[in-house]
Image (cartoon, helix red, strand yellow):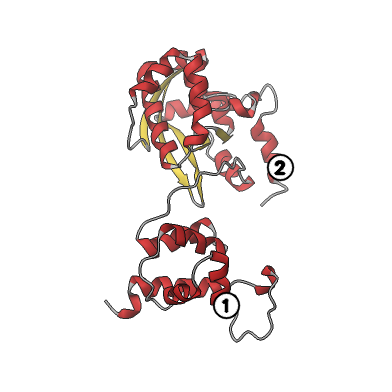
């Protein structure tokens, strides 16, 4: 391998490029008497609380492997985005950083339009702890009218374990509940959301003996990105969906779940129900109105 493409040199080049993009004035520093754009090395080192000599060595490709703590401080000093911070860790340590879960329920109008375009396939966007934060009209009529619930109640585990409608819709409720809970464990752990999961788990353990027992079993479920789901709809009767879960680019805290009707007949049934006017304005229609104001 050429010496220009060693891990140390790639890391050093990345640090220099990111440092050059910073505006000294944004940090209260004078932009005058600077031979090159951006902050000086010693200024970055001071912001990161590390030795200026060592930081210089890192940029020169001879500082050795920095620790995760040092890389984290450098990432903050250089004001890196989450994507840039991940790239820094991949260069410096050969692995992504530990996940830092941050609750953020905002969904852009553009994402909402993607959901709306998927009709008649029900689709939702959920967080790492399975709070539903956006949905389309097909999801409202086929899965749950999330718009009728307060935001703190729009959780898939709450629906599965506490709502009688979930039991009525499933052919084998216990298998579905165990599958959902095992997949939820994986998602929450992967997102580093243990602190956020605690209150939800405590509440469900109090309210649902079945949840309490299943939670203590500590089952986890892997590859749950694609499967077939069979439900009993109160109006349309038996339906089958091929469902898939997708990560959302730039939003590691969110995923999109799409339920495609398994047969043309199922799709026509859903279309016929969607053709009927809703009884009241749903969140989807309100969001669509707001979308005209956004990008």
Quadrant housing the N terminus: bottom left
Which of 6/143 is in front?
Answer: 6
- What's the residue at 69%, 49% (across, down)? 294
Please provide percent x and percent y for residue 51: 49, 71
Which of 222/113 is in front?
Answer: 222
- What's the residue at 52%, 16% (across, down)? 163
Please provide percent x and percent y for residue 87: 44, 62
Q: Residues within 10 Å of mark 1 (few under 14, many from 20)?
A: some
- What's the residue at 71%, 42% (across, down)? 290
Residue bearing mark 2: 290
Residue bearing mark 1: 40
What is the quadrant of residue 287 in the picture?
Answer: top right
Cβ atoms at labels 2 and 1 below 8 Å apart = no
- What's the residue at 49%, 29% (across, down)? 198
Q: Residues within 10 Å of mark 2 (few under 14, many from 20)?
A: few
Please provide percent x and percent y for residue 174: 37, 17
Q: Earlier in the sequence, mark 2 or mark 1?
A: 1
In the image, is residue 102 above or below residue 2? above
Is 90 on the left-hand or right-hand side of 24? left
Which of 62/190 is in front?
Answer: 62
Disc 2 to disc 1, C-alpha distance: 44 Å
């Amino acid at each position: 391998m050429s010496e220009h493409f060693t891990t140390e040199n790639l890391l050093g080049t990345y640090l220099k490029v990111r440092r050059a993009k910073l505006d000294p004035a944004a940090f209260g520093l004078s932009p005058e008497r600077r031979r090159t754009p951006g902050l000086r090395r010693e200024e970055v080192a001071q912001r990161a609380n590390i030795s200026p000599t060592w930081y210089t060595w890192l940029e020169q490709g001879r500082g050795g492997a920095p620790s995760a703590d040092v890389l984290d401080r450098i990432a903050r000093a250089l004001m890196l985005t989450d994507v840039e911070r991940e790239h820094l860790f991949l260069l410096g340590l050969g692995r992504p950083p530990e996940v830092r879960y941050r609750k953020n329920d905002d969904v852009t109008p553009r994402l909402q339009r993607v959901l709306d375009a998927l009709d008649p396939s029900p689709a939702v966007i959920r967080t790492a702890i399975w709070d539903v934060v956006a949905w389309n009209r097909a999801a409202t009529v086929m899965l749950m009218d999330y718009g009728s619930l307060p935001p703190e109640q729009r959780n898939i585990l709450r629906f599965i374990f506490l709502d009688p409608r979930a039991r009525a819709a499933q052919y084998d409720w216990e298998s579905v509940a165990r599958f959902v809970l095992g997949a939820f464990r994986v998602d929450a752990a992967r997102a580093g959301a243990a602190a956020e999961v605690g209150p939800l788990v405590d509440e469900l353990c109090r309210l649902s003996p079945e949840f309490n027992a299943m939670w203590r079993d500590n089952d986890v479920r892997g590859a749950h990105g694609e499967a077939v789901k069979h439900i009993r709809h109160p109006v349309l009767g038996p339906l089958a969906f091929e469902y898939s879960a997708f990560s959302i680019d730039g939003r590691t805290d969110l995923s999109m779940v799409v339920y495609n009707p398994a047969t043309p007949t199922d799709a026509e049934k859903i279309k016929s129900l969607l053709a009927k006017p809703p009884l009241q304005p749903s969140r989807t229609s309100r969001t669509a109105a707001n979308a005209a104001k956004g990008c």
